[in-house]
Image (tube, rainbow, N blue to C red):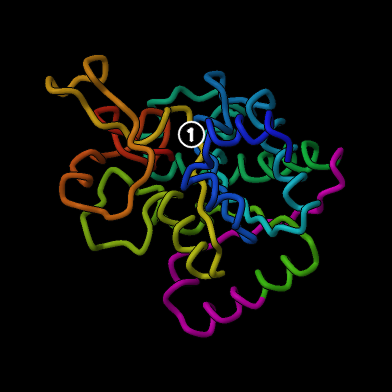
Amino acid sequence: MNDKVRAVTNQHPESEQQKRLRAARRAVIKLGTGIVTGADGQFNVEHLAPVARTIAALKKEGRQVVLVSSGAVGLGRGRLGLHRDRLNDMVMRQACAAVGQSLLMHEYEKLFQTHGVQLAQVLLTEGDFVDRTRYSNLRETMEALLKLGVLPIVNENDTVSTAELDYLNIRAGERIFSDNDRLAALVMSHIEADLLVLLTDVDGLMQLGPSGLKETGTKVIPLVEEVTSELKSLALGPSEGGRGGPSRRGRCPG
């Protein structure tokens, strides 16, 4: 290493986040609704094309990736031409999910085809994490897919399960998972991944200013080592347009 390169390296030491990212060999990446779909309810190729390139590059490096993707309900709503208010009805959300899930996979097939990445659809319910036999079967299937070099795309089976869709009536402790953020965390634990990345349209977990408003002294919390009660207070409900993630008062990726 010459002196010039050494000087630049010393000026910009690798952060803890960068070290963990570099060391990870198996990762779970979660895409929120705001990333997957645009305001028009269509698949957002502009957002997702660079994500697909990055995932393809990671796989070429020998890393294993699982993608947890929201967006089925949003795509279904867009295809059916329904107003967002119609999603206040549970059955309507399930109907939109049934329409949108095939659309979601079709768009991902087109997106990853140019990179030569093979995909698998994995639709899960709470029972897959509770029943021992189903849990074991899921683990074996996921391991087989990853060894084959396939990219599993995971979502809740919203057509038959209401665990995620019934977000208007969730009470603490009732559900194994109630949004894809938690589903992604379960999948990460299930396959013993090294890293969970939540991609969103906000900057990250925000520390609010003295007035409690985003515009006054807000800053991103770069690394969370321990989940404290103060940290939990920054995560107060679903983000706009999605079911997961904290509210606009202080949202984290999701």
* Numbered disc total: 1
Q: Is residue 125 magenta?
A: yes
Q: Residue at x 50, y 35 (%)?
A: 33
Q: Residue at x 71, y 40 (%)?
A: 54
Residue 64 x/y as whole percent: 69, 59
Q: Residue at x 80, y 67 (%)?
A: 148
Q: Quadrant of the C terminus?
A: top left
Q: Residue at x 81, y 53 (%)?
A: 118
Q: Quadrant of residue 242?
A: top left
Amino acid of disc 1: Thr
Q: Is residue 163 magenta?
A: no
Residue 77 x/y as whole percent: 54, 31
Residue placed most toward the observer, 225 or 183:
225
Range of residues picked out in magenta: 114-140
Q: Quadrant of the N terminus?
A: top right
Residue wearing tag 1: 200
In the picture shown, does residue 127 fall above or below 89?
below
Residue 249 x/y as whole percent: 24, 28
Task: For label 1, count other residues whose C-alpha is less than 10 Å away and answer few (under 14), some (14-19) or many (20+).
Answer: some
In the picture shown, does residue 187 fall above or below 54?
below
Residue 97 x/y as whole percent: 54, 44
Residue placed most toward the observer, 93 or 152:
152
Residue placed most toward the observer, 213 or 159:
213
Farthest residue toward the left? 211
Left or right? Give the position of 212 relative to 58. left
Residue placed most toward the observer, 107 or 220:
220
Farthest residue toward the bottom? 133
Farthest residue toward the front? 3
Kindly state the secondary structure of the residue where label 1 is placed.
loop
